[in-house]
Amino acid sequence: MIMAGGKGTRLEPFTKILPKPLVPIHEKPIIEHIIEKFTTIGIDDFHITTNYKSRILKAFFEELNPDYSLNFVKELEPLGTAGSLKLLEGKLDKPFFVTDCDILIKTDYVSLYEFHQNGRYDVTLVASAKEYVIPYGTCELNSEGHLSHINEKPKYDFLINSGLYVLNPDILSIIPENKFYHITNLIEDAQKQGKKVGVFPIDDDNWIDVGQWAEYKKVVDNL
């Protein structure tokens, strides 16, 4: 499932004309680069959620006439990053990938799928390791509000949600119908119900958020 219904405001003015999935990277739009990540491992069945400029996106694929199967899932109104997944309930019988349409992930997708199955997870999210350096000395205070010490340019390590997931089909029953609902809401509600959520870590260099201008320019230069 490729979530492709958003307006892509971070990539304006391109997205004033094109839907975000069709913003070009060299000779192909973003969405083709994403699809190729899956077709190389034998996946040939794709569902694409659409809303903003959906007719342009459909026309592109009609002209492309790909050799893989496409099913367009139309959002009558924006439903967030997970609301439209409800429209697939009852149509899938095994774990499936869900990806944002503005990210490029370099990883072993087969290993990711096996990680999900072997760990018996209900949801697996791919997380990118990020290191942030604060370019200043940060002040630590004691219990009396006085200076305890100064950390010079401290470094912090985080795992950042990349926008690529593996979901079990029965997890879709948690999603409310016709409601704006993000995938973070789905993960939180799944955990409340005792579902098992796994995290598949990748290196920072293996995740590119093409939806940001700085990253878009970087991938155009390096891909």
Image (cartoon, helix red, strand yellow):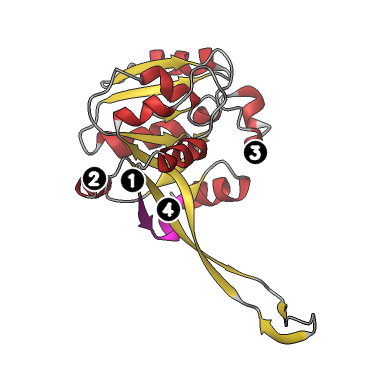
Type of amino acid under label 4 = Ala
Q: Is residue 218 magenta?
A: no
Residue denoted by label 3 = 10
Main SS of the magenta segment? strand
The label nearer to you, 1 versus 3, is 1
Marks 4 and 1, how far apart in space? 16 Å
Mark 2, other Cα within 10 Å: few <14 / some 14–19 / many ≥20: some
Q: Which one is earlier in the sequence, the residue at label 1 or at label 3?
A: 3
- At 39% from the left edge and 31% from the top edge, which residue is drawn? 32
Mark 1, other Cα within 10 Å: few <14 / some 14–19 / many ≥20: some
Q: Which mark is residue 120?
A: 2
**Quarter of the rendering containing residue 72:** top left
Residue denoted by label 1 = 196
Q: Which one is earlier in the sequence, the residue at label 4 or at label 1?
A: 4
Residue 66: % across, % down: 31, 20
Q: Nearer the viewer, residue 26 or 101?
A: 101
Q: Are marks 1 and 2 in contact (CB under 8 Å)?
A: yes
